[in-house]
Image (tube, rainbow, N blue to C red):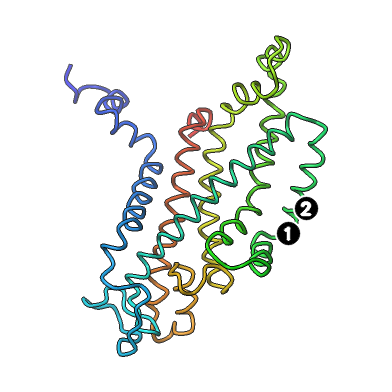
Amino acid sequence: MTATSLPADARRATGPRWLRALRRHPTLYLGVAILALLAIVALAAPWLAPYDPQEIDPLARMKPPSMEHFFGTDALGRDVYSRTLWGARVSLLVGIAVALVATAIGVLLGMLAGYFRRVDALIMRFMDGLMAIPGVLLAIALMATLKGGLGTVIVAIIIPEVPRVVRLVRALVLTLREQPYIEAAVASGTRVPAILWRHILPNLFAPLMVQATFIAASAILTEAVLSFLGVGIPPQIPSWGNIMAEGRNYVAVAFHIILYPGLFLGAAVLAVNLVGDGLRDMLDPRLARKL
């Protein structure tokens, strides 16, 4: 029997492993490809950018895109293409740092709240108080009271994101705590740290991976919003939010100033969300069967 005479399902099951994986989870690999491209652009910004992102040229103010300036120039004559490439570093760094730190803190607090009833009420009431305050307003308040900088922006975004992870982990731990293998481990005398590390934490991996991707996307957007409002990254550091904030007063005459950083920002957020959707489909077999 030749390959062409096989049923359609059988033909789809054949072929290289990478091709079958691509067919099953196209959104995951598309998102990874876009993120990899943005990461390469961010790392290679010193070599790809033809101009210093802070170099001012009053004679080249608000020029349209051309072969000399691919994305045009801003109100101070700075090359928008170079500033957009350098801005990718800030946005990706903020997204990755916030996702990692917020997830780590949320896992620790969530496991304590879900496994120990005595500390559950204390931790969750504190988390409820943080969630009652809009995340952007809380970040603005922190930025107003602390010294501005990249580290301050990351901390200001982490704090509103932690309660989301805590609530997710707590709900999962409350379910896992009642499983027979956990009761068997307790009955056999296994210490609580070992139970949390060996039996509960591995079962949190799949949902946490998905949640971390959405936190990264939210962090990238929040950083852009804070910079756009003038309370985020300092103006001398190029970021997509800063570039759009500086170009908003010249939209009618130089729309290119906010167009290209906005496209890069949208591509980054879209890629992270695609990775999250793909991971959800891949790591949740029940959802995959429904689809």
Identified at 42% across, 56% down, the residue is 268
Residue 57 disc label: none
Q: Residue furthest bottom?
A: 59
Taking the image as shown, residue 186 lies to the left or right of residue 34, namely: right
Q: Residue at x 45, y 61 (%)?
A: 90
Please state which amino acid type lies under the numbered disc 2: Gly
Residue carrying label 1: 133
x then y, percent, for residue 242: 48, 72
Choose top left, top right, bottom left or bottom right for residue 243: bottom left
How far from the left and from the top, in percent, is residue 254? 38, 83
Disc 2 on helix, strand or loop? helix
Residue 241 in picture, x, y percent from top left? 49, 69
**Label 1 CA crowd tier, 10 Å (few <14, some 14–19, many 20+):** few
Query: Quarter of the image holding residue 226?
Result: bottom right
**Residue with the mark numbered 2:** 129
Q: Position of residue 38 (x, y in %)?
A: 36, 55
128 in relation to 25, above or below: below
